[in-house]
Amino acid sequence: MDFDPDRARALLRLGAQDDTADFRPGQLEAIRHVVTGAGRLLVVRKTGWGKSFVYFIGIRMLREAGLGLGLLVSPLLSLMRNQIAAASRMGVVAETINSSNPDDWERVEQRVADDEVDMLLVSPERFANDRFRSGLLARFADGISLMVIDEAHCVSDWGHDFRPHYRMIERIVRVLPPTIRLLATTATANERVMQDLEEVIGPGLAVSRGDLGRPSLALQTIRLPGQAERLAWLAERMSELPGSGIVYTLTVRDAERVAAWLRHRGMAVEAYTGALQDTVRVELENALLDNDVKALVATTALGMGFDKPDLGFVVHYQVPGSVVAYYQQVGRAGRALDAAYGVLLAGWEDTDITNHFIRSAFPTREEVDEVLGALEEVPDGLSVRGIEARVNIGRGRIEKTLELLSLESPAPVVREDGRWQLTAATLGQAFWDRTERLGLLRRREQAAMQEYVDLDDGHMDFLIQALDGEPTVEPGPDLPRLATAVDDRTVREATLFLRSVSPTIEARTSWPTGKRIDPAHRAMEGRSLCQWGDGGWGPLVRLGKYEHARFDDALVRACAGLVRSWRPAPAPTWVTTIPSRRRPELVPDFAHRLADALRLPFRGVLGKKEDRPEQKSMANSDKQARNVIGSLHVDTTAILPEPVLLVDDMVDSRWTFTVAAWELRRRGCEAVWPLALADAGV
């Protein structure tokens, strides 16, 4: 079809809300390619270039020419919200079907049927949904004029563990009518990723690739191994950072902790994670857009597609696992500014966390064999809970294993009416070859980020070369380097803050079978002094458990203070412990001293009937519960009916506390208050 560049420019100015706006290099050519149907196109352009203008102007022009709707595959809810807002500015009617709006699906489907929708946004998981795939998609596939795969690097198997359902796009692309225009966009694609994309989206994939340099970014790396030191740095430097920005963390727990610390220091910050309700996330995004907060402390839930052109800084509290991830995130800053900061703080726990992500990306052969073996025993199929009862694998790992196996082609497992069943297909060697290759690639990407941390300068060139781009010749912005040292007093205050965090131990209310635990026999809500591995009391707990074989008196004083400030009611009148055959004196010694500090009597009423595997070797809730049930002996002659403080060094699954409390309460204890030195459950 014909292409009118003046109409495209008018739509650009409408969308940009700027009567003088003009196309950036490559934009008009990409739009022309899409509208005229010149073939499949991959656009690799840096963040802020305006990739969304390509597909929204493209679909608007196609619709004006009488063609069908566009289908946009988008990975994140926050990204969808921004895309819908951007579409509306240029008169594109956009709707979405995703996991957050099931009540709207019927309405949206009817609008599509009535040809009232220009662009339908879906998450990749929709392609695994039978209702969507065999219903809406099947009915309207012939009428789709443009399919857009946004953040297309997720198609490549480097992101397999991030959004595995992107792998289904390959199958969808194969069955779509050849007349459909196909556009893929991303800001980060090295040569390996581009080759993967060509295999999935090709053949004959044209590539529009531009300069990856970000001359507005002043990049800096700082090694501060301890968490308290990094918290101190943030507290001291935040006021020097221009405007508002984002502080990225690797985990939800760290996002909440860093945000709490900065609020404690009087700063307007909030935590933004995937654990929040969708409405809360929208409110926080708007608060950052309106500069009502200095920063959002975020996980990757706030990432691709979040568009605030005047974001003054991005700080990383920990080192991400790859250059691709880092470039994506730091590229949020300075899009419409002459200068912005991108600062990477490196800590001791970074590698531990990214190692965990690498190890957990794919199931092991043993896990796959156990899951398939369990399904083979029950031809009618099993629920995830049913599989959990038969294998010693965590629920999350079972779900990931089933999900990844179900996305193979042909798939060895299928889900029917909530139950998983084997198919006639077998898992091919290609699956294991891919997982091995990706594991090695992730290790190399992890090592590259550690190289980046050690740089004194040349940070942007390093990132561009790692992404197989051409090094930039433009100098960075004229911004002063930020100080790397922190004041000892601030570090001490941060340490005290970390030590003030006392996670709750929520009481379990049901057995693994689903049967409710009698409220009269449940544990009360407990407390732990710290989270395992944190920068507060964590190091001292680790030393006591694994090196000194005795917990320091400072931990006794801290736990006594915790109990006094906690004030459980009815208050415990005596102290007892969870027994251990491997370290029989460690916790009783600590509990004796704690009882003395609280001026309460200590009684050792619980014992072990027999040796059983360590609880930490039990991988799921069913196995953890069964490993404890029936293992405890209660000295009924020593038990007291009054409320008791039940002490252990570590809490993870909470089943040991749950079973011990059940044993004590059914023998007359009025209340059982769990207290642990460290919570290892995160």
Image (cartoon, rainbow, N blue to C red):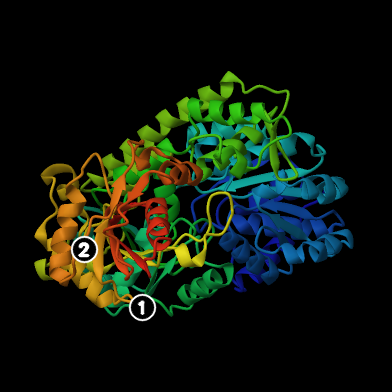
Mark 1 surroundings within 10 Å by alpha-carbon count, few (fewer than 14), some (14 through 19), many (20 or more): some
Q: Is residue 125 above or below residue 241?
A: above
Q: Give residue 369's quadrant in the image.
A: top right
**How many numbered markers are drawn?**
2
Judge left or right: residue 13 versus residue 493: right
Judge left or right: residue 113 versus residue 240: right
Q: Is residue 354 above or below residue 276?
A: above
Residue at the image point whose x is 28% and y is 67% from the top: 501
Along the line of sight, which residue is nearer the eye, 366 or 443?
Answer: 366
Mark 1–mark 2 CB contact (< 8 Å): no
Q: Is residue 653 visible?
A: no
Q: Give residue 314's quadrant in the image.
A: bottom left
Label 1: state its secondary structure. loop
Callout 2 amino acid: Leu
> Which residue carries the number 1 mark?
268
Callout 1 amino acid: Ala
Along the line of sight, which residue is nearer the eye, 88 or 9?
Answer: 88
Residue at the image point whose x is 58% and y is 60% from the top: 79
The image position of residue 124, as x and y in percent, is 65, 48
Q: Earlier in the sequence, mark 1 or mark 2?
A: 1
The image position of residue 4, as x and y in percent, is 76, 57
Residue at the image point whose x is 60% and y is 73% from the top: 18
The image position of residue 296, as x and y in percent, is 41, 68
The image position of residue 203, as x and y in percent, is 69, 30
Q: Is residue 383 visible?
A: yes
> Which residue carries the number 2 mark?
482
